[in-house]
Amino acid sequence: MTIVADNLTKVYKTATALKGIDLRITEPKIYGLLGRNGAGKSTFMQLLAGFDRPTQGNLLVNGMKPFDNQAVTENICLIKEADNFKKDLTIEQTLKIASMFYTNWDKQLAADLLQGFDLDKKRRIKNLSKGMESALGIIVGLASNASVTMLDEPYIGLDAASRAYFYEVLLEEFERSPRIIILSTHLIDEVSNLFEEVIIFRKGSILLRKSAEELRSESYCISGPAAQVKAFTSDKNIIKEKSFAGTTQVYLLSSDELKRTGDLAVSGVPLQDMMVYLTENRGVHA
Ligand SMILES: Nc1ncnc2c1ncn2[C@@H]1O[C@H](COP(=O)(O)OP(=O)(O)OP(=O)(O)O)[C@@H](O)[C@H]1O
């Protein structure tokens, strides 16, 4: 699958959600789509799923526009954070409809996940708890086996154990059947290790796009006696600083190999801290 956004722009009456985005996604990977509230993540995913059309620019999947084009959308699955399904239908009916729409539907996986999430297929959507409805969204998303699968904050109401189960099956399924999986989330701490690549949106533009590998190689954790750490880091780009009993630990942004660190200990910065920093702050690295 080749996804190409070219000057992709979406203007709503009261807001410009996407401001001329250029983006190319081709490799099957788990992508983290990050950004503060209102950054444009959901809008991008809705355009990609063919739910809506751009105001300007182009978004093409294998050279075709997704809007109103079943030949494209039967291979693209978007699960939103809510309201994915018709309220009066049962789980069983919902899965049946999904199985008819998505060309690569995996019936066995849907059955296994139904059991894994402990859902009763006879129940109607309107009688499900928030967490159960999210679980059903995850089941449809994964069982769709769509070449482009997007999950837009799909865990609302899911308890910690169910979220852990979701992360586990997401990885398993990706390994079994690699595809483009785009996961939008604010729970960066929990999922940062799933992402092979992150794309961070800010105010309708792309702030940065980097692989987990790049993020790891562009940051360091320095620790040691407070005064020495301070002297060493005074002219550097600090992400985070923690002091305890005369010892200081500083996370630094730097793509150069650190030299003359003396007695200071140098290690890596946890990926989630980098992602949280870049998403929530200025993103000096952009
Ligand atoms: N249907 C709509 N009508 C009008 N404005 C909209 C609509 N959908 C989104 N917007 C606006 O577009 C901007 C981007 O919203 P979007 O939902 O894409 O952001 P987001 O990054 O997904 O945010 P969040 O993390 O809060 O879900 C916001 O200013 C939002 O208010």
Image (tube, helix red, strand yellow):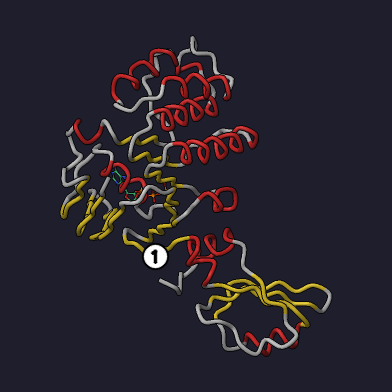
Please name whichever residue, 254 or 154, is drawn nearer the observer in this view of the structure: 254
Q: Which secondary structure, mark 1? A: strand
Specify the quadrant that holds the C terminus: bottom left
The answer to whether residue 274 is left or right of residue 180 is right
Q: Is residue 240 shown above or below 66?
A: below
Residue at (15% x, 54% y) in the render: 56
Q: Quadrant of residue 247?
A: bottom right
Q: Is mark 1 within 8 Å of ligand 1?
A: no
Q: Residues within 10 Å of mark 1 (few under 14, many from 20)?
A: some
The answer to whether residue 240 is left or right of residue 169 is right
**How many numbered badges does the structure rendering display?**
1
Horizontal and vertical percent position of residue 174: 46, 40
Please name whichever residue, 93 or 74, is drawn nearer the observer in this view of the structure: 74
Q: Is residue 143 shown above or below 91?
A: below
Specify the quadrant that holds the N terminus: top left
Q: Is residue 276 shown above or below 99?
A: below
Seen as rendered, the residue at the extreme front is 176
The answer to whether residue 155 is left or right of residue 222 is left
Residue at (63% x, 85% y) in the render: 233
Please name whichever residue, 42 or 208, is drawn nearer the observer in this view of the structure: 208
Horizontal and vertical percent position of residue 23: 28, 58
Name the kind of residue labelled 1 in the image: Leu
Seen as rendered, the residue at the extreme top is 122
Q: Which residue is mark 1?
A: 208
Horizontal and vertical percent position of residue 165: 59, 34
Please name whichever residue, 196 or 158, is drawn nearer the observer in this view of the structure: 196
Residue at (20% x, 40% y) in the render: 66
Horizontal and vertical percent position of residue 246: 82, 79
Residue at (38% x, 65% y) in the render: 207
